[in-house]
Amino acid sequence: MTVAREELLIAAIADLIAAPHPHPVRHAAVGAASPIPAHAVMLARHRGHDVRLSLLQQRVGNPFTEGARELFDLAGQGRIDLFFLGGVQIDGQANINLIGTGTPAGSSARLPGNFGSAFMAFTVPRVILFREEHSPRVLVPTVDYVSAPGVSPPGVFRRGSPQALVTGRCVFTFDAARARFALASLHPGETRESVREATGFDYDEPDAVPETRGPSESDRAALAGPIRAALEDTYPQFCARVFGARAA
Amino acid sequence: MTVPLDSLDALAARVSDGAFVALPPDNSLCPVSLVRALIRRGVRDLHLLGVPISGFATDLLIGAGCVRSLTTSAVTLGEAGLAPRFTAAMKAGSLRLTDATCPAVHTALQAAEKGVPFMPLRGMIGTDLLPQRSDWKVIDNPFADAPDPIVLVPALVPDLALIHAAMADRHGNVWVGRRRELATIAHAARATLVTAERIVEGNLMEDERLAPGVISSLYVSAVAVAERGAWPLGLLDLYGADAAHIDAYAKAARTDEGFRAYLAAHVLAPMPKAAE
């Protein structure tokens, strides 16, 4: 059976979670409607990485007793190591826009809003940016509205910066000191040229750019088995789509 | 002081036109039956506060013309996608929106429950949200050795908090279980109106196992029974969201006509399914 695109993205994010980093991931939180990041944290755990996943949307057995407020209090204290953010626009400095495009922002099409991004980007030391659509309209030179900045000037409190940007075409890593992305791996079927053409911002391109490592057979068995069992109540539509209908 | 047990319509009548009303998000005991009753009563000019975000119930109120302004961190139907009446109102310019970010809403309510004028909150510096919010201030942390800018958000005191609880007793104590962030909304608001799935005998505050999930009658102005009162949203582990219904709403409400038809069928008409 061919590897689903979702499985590839899950494996790529799981690799980033386990990658060496000054802030090791012991506690990851996943907000609204993020099935791929949630599965990636569970996969990293399956591979032996000792990480706790707090799923904000979990209906039964929710990790919190004070709802989202507890999530933000935990983040404020530095008790959440990893969070995921996306955006209708993401630019080359890792700024994200969740409000919408146009002038004023949102005037062409208004999107839901900032959610907790304007806080989480500062208080959580490790952020992985994730957006499946990889096109010049999403990956822009400069966002029309900064919901959360990728970097901040010295003296402004923040615990870290985005670690990477994962899209449907590739993985970029982010160098906060230079506020610049570098192409880290290409998903199967993509080339340096196809990614360059689909990206509206400039980025570094090292000599060696490997293919994104997909899931192993053991990964796939875990995703379709115990990980699905753990996450199906939270993401029923996603699980049915990616892992197939459940046998009755 | 006794807390009256109202009919749903009598509870809705306690919400004045123009009130500043806090609503929980879709996944946390949102009182949708009460919202439908508010639409039937024709409430107008509400200023809604999404704690910290808004969803189905707010979209219904916006579409029905009940909302003048909205303070929230996002409006979304979750897996069903964008909130169609919010999107349409933004396009038409008919809704005054104040953007926030989730923890700022919680923090502003926590300031209110403590009775202090403001509280500090990390983050937000360098975003485009901060300059939009002339009511938020940046100060230099007076306790730090080095310069340390930090944002202050003023206390938010809603006129009313509206909550759907899993149960209530005849004293007006209401049980929200693990959703204890709802207590903060009740503590911060001037008054709290509660719908409950059912009335239980006895006193919830005297049950040591249930009391931690109780909002005390001290904060509750009135209660009404609304069986399946969160529908089509879910309620704790009692029932899940009706995803097919919310999907159908998301599609129908993309047009004015579709929304009107939805209102006629599910809000304005008597609805035995939700026991209204």
Image (cartoon, coloured by chain):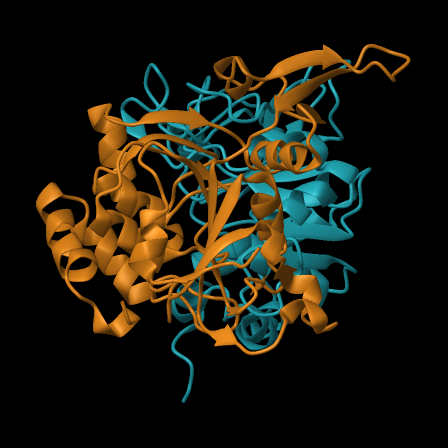
Chain colours: A cyan, B orange
- Please tell me in which quadrant of the rendered image residue A4 appears: bottom left
Q: State the residue in front, A84 or B208.
A: B208
User: Which residue: 39% across, 40% down?
Assistant: B75
User: Which residue: 42% across, 43% down?
Assistant: B54
Task: Find residue B59 and report its horizontal and vertical position in percent.
Answer: 30, 44
Taking B62 as reference, is B215 left or right? Answer: right
Taking A76 as reference, is B83 left or right? Answer: left
Task: Find residue B183 and report its horizontal and vertical position in percent.
Answer: 61, 51
Above or below for B87 versus B219: above
Task: Find residue A243 and report its horizontal and vertical position in percent.
Answer: 45, 71
Q: Residue furthest right?
A: B145
Q: Residue furthest bottom?
A: A248
Q: Is residue B235 visible?
A: yes
Quarter that holds the C terminus of chain B: bottom left
Q: Is residue A30 visible?
A: no
Task: Find residue B18 and report its horizontal and vertical position in percent.
Answer: 34, 31
